[in-house]
């Protein structure tokens, strides 16, 4: 072209706008071929943000429930209880001492502590009220048996020995509680996974429709790209980059809000931990804090939702491009 | 370079809008494509640009039968053809510079490699001061020149222009014609679709006249 004289000249002096060519000469970053700020793009980002928030909320709640169940389970499984019932013709103090001796003689036992008569009476006080003379009531005596961590205690043998030597004593290894805890934790995990799957399905459907909308909006761009010789692969890569960015942005917003939500919940939990209400909430709901694994799961969800958005929109873009001649 | 043999075109089940078109477009040739409104000029241009398939006949472009081309082959072949649309088809979110550089960007060329060439071309078409402007703020004539610059930046072997003077005053129309003539002199075959008799009288060139679906060639 340089050998041909310009056929057009502007009437304005070049100095008046000399900054414009200079600006382009310095320009390093080109405008994306697919514009970022369209209404369809913002809708898609909002969908991804909401879905990531819901998924992160579910993941956080599940890890919280599983964490609490595990805390209860490990606390319960570290000790067993022997209950000595009062019976006619039996001295409950003697039976308690005999049961303590049997427990101490068993391997894998770290510590045995029998509740005194007064302590046992205090256990029923919340239900019967204070200021009553409970000495005439047949209140059973509790023996707390702490286990050596990791030790395999033969509960069947201990139960048999107690039955033989102290007929009024019974052993409770909390198996029923532990099983219920495990069931509850498993149900929470299965429920959480089901919700996550539903959220991902809804995300895929929403992203598909939003991508179709975005493609319809950007159809003139697709046509121009075809006219200047772009292959479907090139056009698809431009749109996939655009949608991956939207997905990451939406995922970061939704996941970020969820992280903030759990952070505030944890701070509230710490703030309330000294109060009576906080202690009751702690007993009911556990620690109300998400573990490191939970936070990592939320970060993973942000990446997952961005990937789901990119893959779904990529498939939709390819389908749309096939339909455009 | 391009050969049409007994080409016919119909839309759906309607009547044939173009019938038995047989002609050639040679390298470095210059021709006007004319005819009354609705004669099928744009349809013929679209077939030349591979965005419309004929319903019968043979179209050979650059020694290849276009019927046998895949979609990606057609995209690759379009890189050898530049087209100027009547409505410009510039992308409003890209600057004049980015619009003109688009064919090179699609080819995967590095921006630093083509920057000087694009700026030189923009200056050549008189848009040197409008490099960073977005199309919505350009005048009709400026958009037309930007569209022409985009069509020729990748040095196509064939340039197609659909009513390139339809939106500009006669004076600018003549200046655009001079631009096409100079492009032709630099080696590009040119096909200008127009019904502007005055424009055609400005330059003595081959005329392809469409009338009632048939093509008459006046060399």
Image: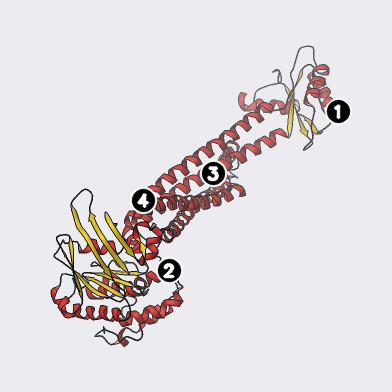
Q: In which quarter of the image is the N terminus of chain B?
A: bottom left
Please tell me the numbered disc located at residue A105.
Answer: 1
The residue where tag 2 is placed is B107
4 and 2 marks on the same chain: no
Left or right position of A156 against B19: right
- Chain letter for the residue marked with disc 3 in the picture: A
**Frontmost residue, B139 versus A79:** B139
Q: Quadrant of residue B31?
A: bottom left
User: What whole-number distance in Å separates the C-alpha atoms at marks 4 and 1?
Assistant: 74 Å
The residue where tag 4 is placed is A212
Which numbered disc flags the more N-terminal residue, 4 or 3?
3
- Percent position of residue B57, x then y: 27, 57
**SS under mark 1:** loop
Left or right position of A209 against A103: left
3 and 1 marks on the same chain: yes
Q: Which colour scheme is used?
A: secondary structure
């Amino acid at each position: 072209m340089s050998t041909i004289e310009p056929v057009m000249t502007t009437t304005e002096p070049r100095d008046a706008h000399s900054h414009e060519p200079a600006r382009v000469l310095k320009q390093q970053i080109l405008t994306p071929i697919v514009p970022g700020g369209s209404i369809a793009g913002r809708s898609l980002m909002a969908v991804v943000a909401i879905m990531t928030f819901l998924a992160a909320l579910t993941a956080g709640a599940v890890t919280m429930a599983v964490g609490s169940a595990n805390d209860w389970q490990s606390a319960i499984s570290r000790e067993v209880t022997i209950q000595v019932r009062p019976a006619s013709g039996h001295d409950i103090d003697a039976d308690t001492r005999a049961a303590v001796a049997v427990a101490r003689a068993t391997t894998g036992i770290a510590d045995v502590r029998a509740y005194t008569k007064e302590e046992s009476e205090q256990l029923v006080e919340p239900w019967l009220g204070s200021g009553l003379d409970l000495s005439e009531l047949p209140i059973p005596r509790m023996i707390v048996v702490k286990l050596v961590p990791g030790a395999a205690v033969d509960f069947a043998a201990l139960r048999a020995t107690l039955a033989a030597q102290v007929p009024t004593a019974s052993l409770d290894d909390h198996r029923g509680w532990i099983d219920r805890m495990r069931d509850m934790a498993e149900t929470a995990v299965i429920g959480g996974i089901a919700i996550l799957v539903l959220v991902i399905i809804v995300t895929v459907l929403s992203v598909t429709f939003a991508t179709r909308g975005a493609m319809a909006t950007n159809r003139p761009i697709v046509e121009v790209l075809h006219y200047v010789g772009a292959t479907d692969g090139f056009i698809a890569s431009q749109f996939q980059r655009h949608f991956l960015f939207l997905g990451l942005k939406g995922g970061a917003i939704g996941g970020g809000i969820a992280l903030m939500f759990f952070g505030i919940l944890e701070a509230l939990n710490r703030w309330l931990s000294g109060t009576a209400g906080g202690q009751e909430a702690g007993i009911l709901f556990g620690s109300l804090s998400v573990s490191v694994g939970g936070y990592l799961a939320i970060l993973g969800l942000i990446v997952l939702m961005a990937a789901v958005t990119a893959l779904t929109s990529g498939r939709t873009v390819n389908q749309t491009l096939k339909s455009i001649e | 370079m391009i050969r049409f043999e007994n080409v016919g075109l119909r839309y759906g089940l309607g009547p044939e809008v173009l019938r038995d078109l047989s002609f050639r477009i040679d390298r470095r040739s210059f021709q006007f494509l004319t005819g009354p409104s609705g004669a099928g000029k744009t349809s013929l241009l679209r077939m030349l640009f591979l965005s419309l398939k004929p319903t019968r006949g043979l179209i050979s472009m650059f020694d290849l039968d276009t019927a046998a081309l895949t979609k990606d082959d057609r995209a690759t072949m379009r890189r050898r053809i530049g087209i100027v649309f009547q409505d410009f088809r510039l992308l409003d979110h890209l600057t004049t510079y980015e619009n003109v550089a688009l064919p090179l960007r699609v080819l995967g060329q590095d921006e630093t490699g083509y920057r000087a060439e694009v700026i030189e071309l923009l200056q050549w078409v008189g848009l040197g001061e409008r490099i960073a402007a977005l199309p919505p703020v350009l005048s009709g004539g400026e958009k037309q020149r930007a569209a022409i610059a985009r069509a020729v930046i990748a040095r196509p072997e064939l340039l197609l222009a659909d009513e390139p003077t339809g939106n500009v005053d006669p004076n600018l129309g003549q200046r655009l014609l001079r631009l096409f003539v100079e492009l032709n002199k630099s080696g590009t075959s040119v096909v200008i679709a127009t019904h502007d008799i005055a424009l055609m009288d400005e330059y003595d060139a081959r005329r392809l006249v469409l009338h009632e679906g048939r093509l008459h060639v006046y060399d």
